[in-house]
Image (cartoon, rainbow, N blue to C red):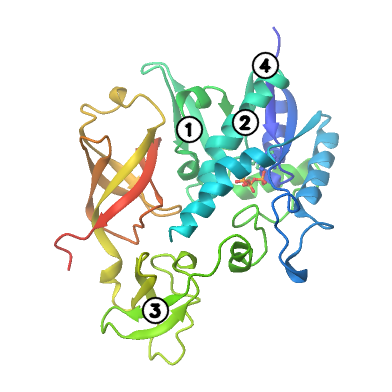
Amino acid sequence: MKKEKVIVGLSGGVDSSVAALLLQEQGYEVEALFMRNWDSMANNDVLGNDQQIDATCPQELDYLDAQQVAAKLGIKLHRVDFIKEYWDHVFQYFIEEYQKGRTPNPDILCNKYIKFDKFLNYALTELKADKIAMGHYAGVQFNAQTKQFEMIRALDQNKDQTYFLAQLSQAQLSKVLFPLQSLKKAEIRKIAADHNLVTANKKDSTGICFIGEREFTKFLQNYIPNQPGEIVDIHTNQVVGHHIGVMYYTIGQRKGLNLGGMAEPYYVANKDIDKKIIYVAKARDESFLLSNKAIVNEINWTLDLTQYVDDLHDFWCTAKFRYRQADSPVHLIKLKDGSYQVSYAQPVKAVTEGQQAVFYLGNICLGGGIIDKVSKEQLQ
Ligand SMILES: Nc1ncnc2c1ncn2[C@@H]1O[C@H](COP(=O)(O)OP(=O)(O)OP(=O)(O)O)[C@@H](O)[C@H]1O
């Protein structure tokens, strides 16, 4: 029987290296694809001497690592540029949202529009693959009863990345393998070391990929002018400081407020985007962070929900309102305009407009949408 051909997204990191290796061991015909989504010169990403990246562009170093891994495994490595697509579908939205004072997550859009769309199509059509595979911490399983591909959480709850994958569709999930679902990071590193892969001890990537290790504010100032405003104490309504733009602050943030001379620590309790005001509250009083209801719109369901809940207009499940947050039981009611009113069984901290809420039924990721209109009825 002909082997299934799988194209692995090989990033030059340890996770995708081991994903490729495991698929090979499982008997697939494996090839790899390295993609480049960012071009500093073309994107005008030149920030002054300490911030410049070109000679030692981490992307090219990653490519060298990917080449070494592919050589060691004896698999073909392809390379493709999605720089324009990334700019159009991910970066522009990211900047537009920041300009509105919101803090969007580019990884979610990258998964939806680049990795599981442009990359997937390229692999299927140009490289004649049957499927693609990624080194994400997540899983996909076919449920023969419901006839649905279910995206499931990684066994390692601390690493689980389903939050970032909640925008995927059945069509996408039917073409994807996630070989790392049941592995812990330490096990992945051990497998890489046992097979002498150069990436075995490579540092995990952190933060937003196109910014890398660089200073976030300086990077963003390249694209968005400062929008200075006041920092106001929510308890007294007094101005206690100044900021260079509400977009640089997220609800709940404690560090980097530069409120010299205050007797005790403060956190960001609220943002008035139109008036450019950041409201801060005393760290010992977390009540301003709590909410118990939100409207979530533009929801993508990863599967046919009617197979999983009795009434899709009114059901209970659990939700995460940000990455790495514990799930909260929530009650969803569908509104006329298609959005959902989400009420939480217990108040939840730092639910933030513009970020994504992701819904789960046990281990299955049902989908996610954008948080809008957070409310604190009867909490204060
Ligand atoms: N430049 C790239 N080219 C091809 N695939 C990529 C690239 N960047 C990421 N991927 C794929 O997306 C997966 C998840 O990306 P993420 O940035 O979360 O990686 P990671 O957890 O740091 O994984 P890795 O250790 O493989 O870099 C990677 O494991 C890889 O399969």
Ligand 1's quadrant is top right
Question: In the rendered view of the protein, which quadrant contains the C terminus?
Answer: bottom left
C-alpha span from label 1 to label 2: 13 Å
Looking at marks 4 and 3 on the same chain, the residue that comes earlier in the sequence is marked by: 4
Q: Nearer the viewer, mark 1 or mark 4?
A: 1
> Regarding mark 4 in the picture, which secondary structure is present there?
loop
Residue furthest top in the image: 1
- Residue at 75% from the left image edge and 70% from the top image edge: 50
Asked whether mark 2 lies closer than 8 Å to ligand 1, one says no
How far apart marks 2 and 4 lie (CA) works out to 21 Å
Q: Which mark is residue 231?
A: 3
* Residue depicted at x 67% and y 64%: 214
State yes or no: Cβ of the residue under disc 3 lies below 8 Å from any atom of ligand 1.
Answer: no
Amino acid type at image mark 1: Leu
Q: Is residue 178 above or below residue 296?
A: above
Q: How many neighbours does mark 3 have within 10 angstroms: few (below 14), some (14-19), or many (20 or more)? A: many
Q: Residues within 10 Å of mark 4 (few under 14, many from 20)?
A: few
The first of marks 1 and 4 along the sequence is 4
Name the quadrant containing residue 308. Answer: top left
Give coordinates of residue 216: x percent, y percent.
60, 65
Q: What amino acid is labelled 4 in the image? A: Glu
Q: Disc 3 marks which amino acid?
A: Ile
**Viewer-closest of 305 and 186:** 305
- Which residue shows up at 79% across the image and 44% down it? 63
Q: CA distance from mark 1 to mark 4?
A: 22 Å
Q: From the viewer's perspective, is residue 268 above or below residue 127?
A: below
Q: What label does residue 4 carry, if any? A: 4
The residue that disc 2 covers is: 118
Q: Earlier in the sequence, mark 3 or mark 2?
A: 2
Q: Could you say which disc has been placed on residue 52 in the image? A: none
Could you tell me if the residues under marks 1 and 4 are in contact, i.e. CB atoms within 8 Å? no
